[in-house]
Amino acid sequence: MESQSDNKGIWKYSDKWEEELILLKTIIDKTELTETTKWGGPVYVYNKKNVIGIGGFKDYFAIWFFNGVFLKDTKNKLVNAQEDKTKSLRQWRFTSKDAVNEAVILEYIVEAIENEKEGKIIKPSKKEAIVSELLDQEMVKNPALKEAFAKFSPYKQYEFLEYIETAKQEKTKLSRIEKVIPMILNNVGLNDKYR
């Protein structure tokens, strides 16, 4: 039989940080968030929207802010746990109770609640597919272009298509295509230089 602790996934270290997590809970209880349990651990919601979660990991315990990307983070506390995957989630990691500063934590949580009230969220990227007939024509003429374009992630393909198709006039679309063809052939994403 599997013991309970094998089954906790990301929560399997919560016991190690029991006191620390109780301390975080007492701080969070001072806010208007409601505690729920999701994915096997405590998640705090405002108006049924996930605002923060807490949990223990092997080397630290953490609060994560579901829409942490919008926090001002004036004290530079937040980290993005998975750079390429996570768009909005941010973690604040602690390695001891001494690191827990109630006033600052409350400041961050209050800001997160305000952002939730204002409806600041990153829209999920289920975007309408964009078709660029002009780019398609170029690819028919130039198989190497088609092959190079296929190597990009769907997200980067979308950026190119959006860039071309948001132009109002055909001549602008064509000039944008001329601009992106060398980028595509050199495997350079449209916004790579900003990433």
Image: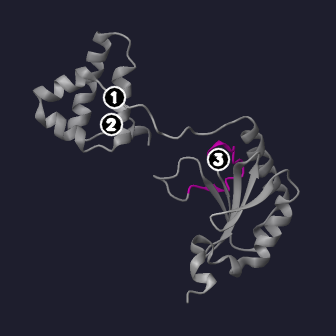
The reply to whether residue 178 is in sight is no
> Residue at left 73%, top 74%?
96
* Inter-mark Cα distance, 3 to 1: 28 Å
Residue that badge 3 annotates: 67
Q: Are marks 2 and 1 in contact (CB under 8 Å)?
A: yes
Residue that badge 1 annotates: 161
Secondary structure under badge 3?
Answer: loop
* Mark sitting on residue 39: none
The reply to whether residue 194 is in sight is yes
Q: Quadrant for residue 12, please give it.
A: bottom right
Q: Nearer the viewer, residue 59 or 54?
A: 54
Q: Crowding near pointer 2: few (<14 within 10 Å), some, many (20+)?
A: some
Residue that badge 2 annotates: 157
* Inter-mark Cα distance, 2 to 1: 6 Å
- Was residue 124 drawn as part of the magenta stretch in this picture? no
Q: Crowding near pointer 3: few (<14 within 10 Å), some, many (20+)?
A: many
- Where residue 84 sits: x, y (%)? 45, 52
Which amino acid type is shown beneath numbered disc 2?
A: Gln
